[in-house]
Amino acid sequence: MLHDLVEQYGPWLVFANVLASSVGLPVPAMPTLVLFGAMAALHPGSIGVQLLPVLVLSIFAVLIGDSLWYLAGRIYGGDTLKTICKLSLSRDTCVKKTERFFGRWGVRVLAVAKFVPGLSIVSVPMAGAMGVSYRTFLSYDSIGAALWSGLGLILGALFASQIDMLLAGAGRLGRMTAVVVGVLLLLYCSYRWFRRRQLIKKLATARIDVDELDHLIAKNETPVVFDIRSDEKRKLDPFVIPGSVAADERQLDQIIAKYPHDQKVVIYCSCPNEISAAWMAKQMSEAGFSDVVPLRGGLDAWRDAGHQLEPLEVEAARDVDVGVAPKAV
């Protein structure tokens, strides 16, 4: 039955699967490419499974899906990344890592992004948000699409005999195979979602509201306020809460060593649920800090409440060296 399906629809199945994967649906496309690579090797005379049409349509599917994300980043800027951060089944810190990876290597990451889980779905809209020209984006994304699609097809061709045995076994099971695959995919997505919710619940302890922080600032009792957004996110949204200090949770040991442990600390990021800020607050509390809290809602909640913001240029002029600790409140 599977062979008949491949014979009838051929490359268009790959196109639909790869396009769905590129727009962000939880449907892995690499197994399909491997399967069709094997089919092409096993049935070289079959029109439906010739390698070239499959490769071409796979590349086009990637470019169509990625172009939609690129345009979303170009039009909506950092809001697109916030949406991805909210919908992702991974921790928000994973999204931040990919932002930093893009900041280090630029649009060139698109040539290899498809091989790194999570990198493509963030780096593609980020290219649009950072103002990369569509021509440049398309050049590197095409290279990445060709390498990724070609690898899947080649792997399928190389291991065609082994895959054929697996397909024969699956054919004997009939519809049960599709049921098993569907159940496994559902279990995987459910597991990732459950882990994310458990993490949010575990970290959702003490918070400080934006109005409370604004009240402290108005009373000239400003605590140490850490802005732990990535540099790339700050470029997209170049405003900070007054008095905040740029900090990097990867330098947590330096921060712990330099600041008084009785110092009140507020941490904010730009991700929904403040997972990054909550994680850092938890680590500092375990290191002996007596009063460390994430800002509920992060920078977006502060902005939505109408509180004052400083341009990044003002913040950059301030001494942000973690070695200089302000006086305790």
Image (cartoon, rainbow, N blue to C red):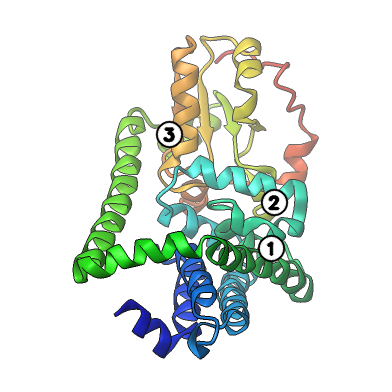
Q: Is residue 44 above or below residue 244?
A: below
Residue 19 pos. (x, y %): 50, 75
Binning the other alpha carbons within 10 Å of mark 1 as few (below 14), some (14 to 19) or many (20 upward) gives: many
Q: Nearer the viewer, mark 3 or mark 1?
A: 1
Q: Quadrant of the C terminus?
A: top right
Measuring from the top left, give residue 320's x and y in whole percent.
73, 28
Residues marked 3 and 1 touching at CB (< 8 Å): no
Q: Earlier in the sequence, mark 3 or mark 1?
A: 1
- Label 2 – label 1 distance at C-alpha: 8 Å
Residue placed most toward the observer, 68 or 301: 68
Determine which quarter of the picture holds residue 2.
Answer: bottom left
Given residues 160 and 268, the one toward you in this image is: 160
Q: Give coordinates of residue 33: x percent, y percent.
A: 51, 69
| C-alpha distance separating marks 3 and 1 | 36 Å
Mark nearest the camera among 2 and 3 is 2
Which label's residue is closer to the chain start, 2 or 3? 2
Amino acid identity at mark 2: Phe
The residue sitting at 69% across, 51% down in the picture is 102
Categorize mark 3 by other alpha carbons within 10 Å: few (<14), some (14-19), many (20+). Answer: few
The reply to whether dot 2 and dot 3 touch (C-beta < 8 Å) is: no
Identify which residue, 17 or 313, lies in the foreground: 17
Q: Amino acid at mark 3?
A: Glu
Mark identifier at residue 127: 1
Q: Which residue position holds label 3?
A: 212
Viewed as shown, does residue 214 lie left or right of 74?
left
Q: Looking at the image, is 163 positioned above or below residue 15?
A: above
Tell me whether the residue at label 2 lies in contact with that at label 1, contact meaning CB atoms closer than 8 angstroms.
yes
| Quadrant placement of the N terminus | bottom left
Q: Can I make out residue 310 in this image?
A: no
Identity of the amino acid at label 1?
Ala
Residue corresponding to mark 2: 102
